Amino acid sequence: MPRLTRGDRIDIHLPPVTLASVASITLKNVPKGVHAALKQQARRHKRSINEEAIVCLDVALGRSPRATLSILDEVRSLRAGIPMKNVDQGWIDAAKRQGRR
């Protein structure tokens, strides 16, 4: 195999890609409170409003692999079984120093 040097041209042939068909919908007369809540939730999840609306629809239609509430319930039950210390800035600083030794 010949060795490549800077400036050499490489031709790559990729198979054609078929894009999935997607549909569009327009929501009209969305109450301001619903829009504000969706916008806030999208910001919290670092998604666009459109992406957040799609996730909400998926969850509402039962298409989500795991609903958010079931994940939260599982996390809460796991946390309940973990002994917690009083964590303050002093404890965090001491843990950092110990980890750097």
Image (cartoon, grey):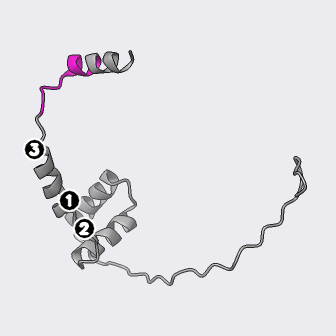
- Mark 2 or mark 3: which comes first in sequence? 2
- Do the CB atoms of the residues marked 3 and 1 lie less than 8 Å apart? no
- Depth check, front residue: 4 or 1: 1
How dense is the environment of label 3, judged by Cα within 10 Å: few (below 14), some, or many (20 and up)? few
- Which element carries disc 2, helix, strand or loop? loop
- Mark 3 or mark 1: which comes first in sequence? 1
Q: Quadrant of the N terminus?
A: bottom right
Q: What's the mark number on residue 66?
A: 2
At which x and y percent is residue 15? Answer: 69, 78
Magenta region: 84-93
Q: Tell which tag, 2 or 3, sits nearer the viewer.
A: 3
How dense is the environment of label 1, judged by Cα within 10 Å: few (below 14), some, or many (20 and up)? few
Residue corresponding to mark 3: 81
Residue corresponding to mark 1: 71
- Magenta span includes 27: no
- Depth check, front residue: 80 or 35: 80
- Which element carries disc 1, helix, strand or loop? helix
At which x and y percent is residue 72? Answer: 17, 56
